[in-house]
């Protein structure tokens, strides 16, 4: 799994150098402070834009697809976010059982604490529970290092206590982050994971549109993203994930693809 020693990316190293040079320039030539400030602000804009790109690796290691060895084994990953949900998650588990598929559930710590038996059932059925923060706050990406550490450590403790398994992966709420997250992930031994295809099934209630988005990205090594928590509903009030999963799982079986957990893909 991930080395706990943080190694800054090229962008982060360049950012540090830029800030040092800007400071030295202002000290040496105070009249140039506008240029120095402009360079620093431009750098911060770049960092912000990179943090708004969930699949970016510019801020640190990020799984956007499975390792090559897993792809060679025709493995693919189904990741399910924002749960557990007492109504939707049990039905998702039954669907996964019917297709003998394994999935990775990125669970919110406070929801897991509310429904601990459901989290244990996820693991009992052969799936994995990973870290999706303790509270899934909308301003998660605005936190600093200490805020990230509190959120992730709390979720680690909550999920480990409930399931008996320490999470190995983390997914940021909405996939958004900033440069302070990666050092915390390294300290906790967590690997950031995003996705290669998503159905936007928290916003889109049209089953066919969600299916098509996921099926277009279904291939060996893919990481698919759907939601059991905060799931959009069809016009009949059915959570979209329940209508979409059977088709996606059947299509994978027809293509000789096998759904595995992210931690299995490490093997």
Image (cartoon, rainbow, N blue to C red):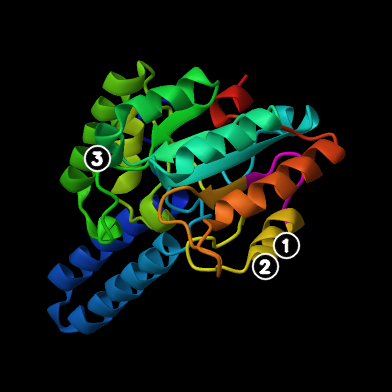
**Side (left or right) of 126 relative to 10:** right
Answer with the quarter of the image where residue 187 lies. Answer: top left
Q: Could you tell me what secondary structure mostly forms the magenta stretch?
A: loop
Please, is residue 161 above or below residue 85 in the view? above
- Badge 3 marks a residue whose secondary structure is helix
Q: Are marks 2 and 1 in contact (CB under 8 Å)?
A: yes
Residue 189 x, y percent position in the rendering: 37, 27
The reply to whether callout 2 and callout 3 are in contact (CB within 8 Å) is no
Mark 3, residues whose alpha carbon is within 10 Å: few (<14), some, or many (≥20)? some
Residue drawn at x 59%, y 49% as measured from the top left: 242
Q: To which residue does mark 3 refer?
A: 110
Question: Marks 2/1: CA distance?
Answer: 5 Å
- Measured as percent of width and height from the top left, residue 124 is found at 48, 18
Residue 219 covered by magenta stretch: yes
Which image quarter holds the C terminus? Answer: top right
Could you say which quadrant of the image residue 129 lies in?
Answer: top left
Left or right of residue 37, residue 39 in this image:
right
Q: Which residue position holds label 2?
A: 209
Categorize mark 1 by other alpha carbons within 10 Å: few (<14), some (14-19), many (20+).
some
Give SS at disc 1: helix
Q: Which residues are magenta?
A: 217-223
């Amino acid at each position: 799994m991930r080395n706990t020693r943080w190694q800054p990316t090229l962008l982060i190293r360049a950012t540090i150098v830029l800030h040092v040079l800007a400071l030295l320039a202002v000290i040496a030539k105070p009249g140039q402070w506008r240029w120095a400030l402009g360079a620093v602000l431009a750098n911060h804009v770049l960092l912000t834009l990179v943090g708004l790109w969930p699949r970016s690796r510019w801020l640190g290691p990020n799984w956007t697809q499975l390792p090559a060895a897993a792809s060679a084994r025709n493995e693919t990953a189904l990741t399910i976010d924002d749960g557990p949900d007492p109504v939707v998650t049990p039905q998702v588990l039954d669907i996964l059982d019917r297709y003998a598929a394994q999935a990775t559930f990125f669970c919110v710590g406070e929801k897991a604490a509310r429904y601990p038996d459901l989290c244990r059932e996820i693991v009992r059925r052969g799936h994995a529970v990973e870290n999706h923060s303790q509270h899934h706050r909308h301003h998660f990406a605005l936190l600093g290092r200490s805020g990230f550490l509190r959120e992730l450590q709390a979720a680690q403790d909550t999920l480990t206590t409930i399931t008996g398994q320490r999470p190995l992966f983390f997914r940021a709420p909405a996939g958004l982050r900033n440069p302070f997250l990666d050092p915390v992930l390294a300290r906790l031994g967590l690997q950031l994971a995003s996705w290669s295809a998503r159905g936007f099934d928290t916003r889109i209630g049209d089953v066919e549109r969600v299916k098509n988005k996921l099926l277009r990205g279904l291939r060996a090594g893919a990481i698919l993203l759907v939601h059991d928590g905060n799931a959009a509903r069809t016009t009949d009030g059915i959570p979209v994930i329940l209508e979409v999963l059977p088709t996606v799982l059947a299509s994978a079986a027809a293509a000789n693809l096998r759904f595995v957990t992210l931690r299995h893909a490490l093997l």
